[in-house]
Every structure is written in C-alpha cells, then in structure tokens.
Amino acid sequence: MTSKLIVNSVRHTGASADGITLDSSGNVTFPGNATCSGTSSGFGKILQVVDVFKGDRFSSSSESFADITGLSITITPTQANSKILVQGSVNGGTQDDNLDYGAGIRTMRSIAGGSFSDDNKLNGAADGNRLRITFKCFASAYNTDHMPTGFHFSGVDNPSYSVGNAIIYKMQVRCQLSSRAFFLNGQTNNQNDTSIYSARYMSSLTAMEIAA
C-alpha cells in the first residue's frame, strides 16, 4: 500500500509565505533563506575547507629539507574514513645562470601530534634511497635574479585517523646546491621596481575534507 501527500506548497502555521512550492512538473523551489541542519554525509561531498596564504618573501639554501615558514595547514576531519584533498601554489624558484640547479618540494603530514612523515599520497612512492617529493622547482631564466615562477599541485590523501584527530600538512624545500638558493614569492635581489621578475607573488595551501 502506498501513501501520497499531494500539495502545491508547504507553509508553517506562523509564516506569511510558503516555505516550499512545487510546480506541475514536480520541481521544488525553496525560498532564498532556506537552511539545512545536520552533517553532510554523502559520498564525495566536501565537508570542510581550510586554507592558508603566504605573501611574504622566503628563502632557503639548505641542502637538507627545511620548512617553508607559513605554508602549514591543520584540518580536523569530522567523519571517519574521509579523504583529504590538498592543493598548493608554491611561487618561487632557485638561483641559476645555466638552468641546471633546482630544488625539491615535498609535503609532510602529521596526525594527532605525531611525527611528520613524507609517507602520504602527495609525494612519490618509496623506491630505494630516492627522495619522495611532491614536485621539483627550478629557475625559469638564465639570469640569477629573474628566476621566480609558479608551481601548483593537487592530490587526494587517505590518512588513517580517528575522528577528532588534527592532521597537519606542511611544505618543505631542499636545494640541490647550497650556493643556488631557493626563493619564494620574490626574486633574489629583492628589487623594488616595476619589472615583471621583481613582482610579488602569493603562495597558498588548501585542504578539503571529502566524505568517503
């Protein structure tokens, strides 16, 4: 036995206008101030978005991985088994005069205050003694002070966590050679003029919780 409620509109007893209207084709219209409560749980839905922006200039000449100050983000999943979509914009490059030297950029992850690890889906797979990085950046010009450029990445990570655990993602850089430093958001000489290579850039990191 099937029951049906056939109406053209639905209105609260204390309201002056209809809250839901239906046309003859079955299309439903909600008013502009309609709200929903509860937690979205549908597969593939974005449950939350967090982001961080870094506009100041940063440099490193380390031949070991070093944190890129300010490019770190924390997301605390609201549901079990969610995946985390991580997107980043790293606007910088290495000093160069023959386009030979670069720098490795990697994404590190910590869960619930644990140690940071490069074992996540943003970096390459483990393979012998090879470094696991997200991408390699390099100089975009032969001139040592004309090198800044933009690098962008996106990946879906599947961390193992408990609901309520804070997950931290941060970016690190490692120079191929210390004499060929990496600069973020600005050129080597930090010139204050209107040339394109003297421009300022904005780097960013975004994390989104995706429902399983």
Image (cartoon, grey):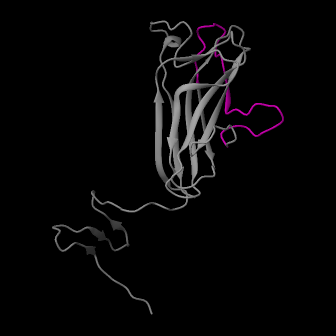
Specify start and end residues of the magenta stretch as a single range. Answer: 121-150
Location of residue 104 by image quarter = top right
- Please give the name of the residue rendered at 63% of the width and 36% of the height, measured from the top-left corner: 108
Q: Residue 127 in magenta?
A: yes
Instruction: Measuring from the top left, give residue 192's x and y in whole percent.
Output: 45, 7
Instruction: Measuring from the top left, give residue 24's x and y in whole percent.
Output: 34, 74
- Please give the name of the residue rendered at 52% of the width and 42% of the height, measured from the top-left corner: 207
Instruction: Measuring from the top left, give residue 175's x and y in whole percent.
Output: 68, 19
Q: Is residue 153 left or right of residue 11?
A: right
Q: Is residue 38 left or right of residue 147?
A: left
- Please give the name of the residue rendered at 84% of the width and 35% of the height, measured from the top-left corner: 128
Instruction: Measuring from the top left, give residue 8's x and y in whole percent.
Output: 28, 76
Q: Residue 202 in magenta?
A: no
Q: Is residue 132 left or right of residue 34?
A: right
Which residue is nearer to you in this view: 173 or 33?
173
Which residue is nearer to you in this view: 170 or 136?
170
Location of residue 116 by image quarter = top right
Q: Is residue 63 left or right of residue 40?
A: right
Point out the residue furthest to the bottom here: 1
Total labels drawn: 0
- Please give the name of the residue rendered at 72% of the width and 18% of the height, measured from the top-left corner: 176
Q: Is residue 49 above or below residue 192?
A: below
Q: Give the quadrant of the N terminus.
A: bottom left
Q: Main secondary structure of the magenta part?
A: loop
Q: Give the quadrant of the C terminus.
A: bottom right
Location of residue 187 by image quarter = top right
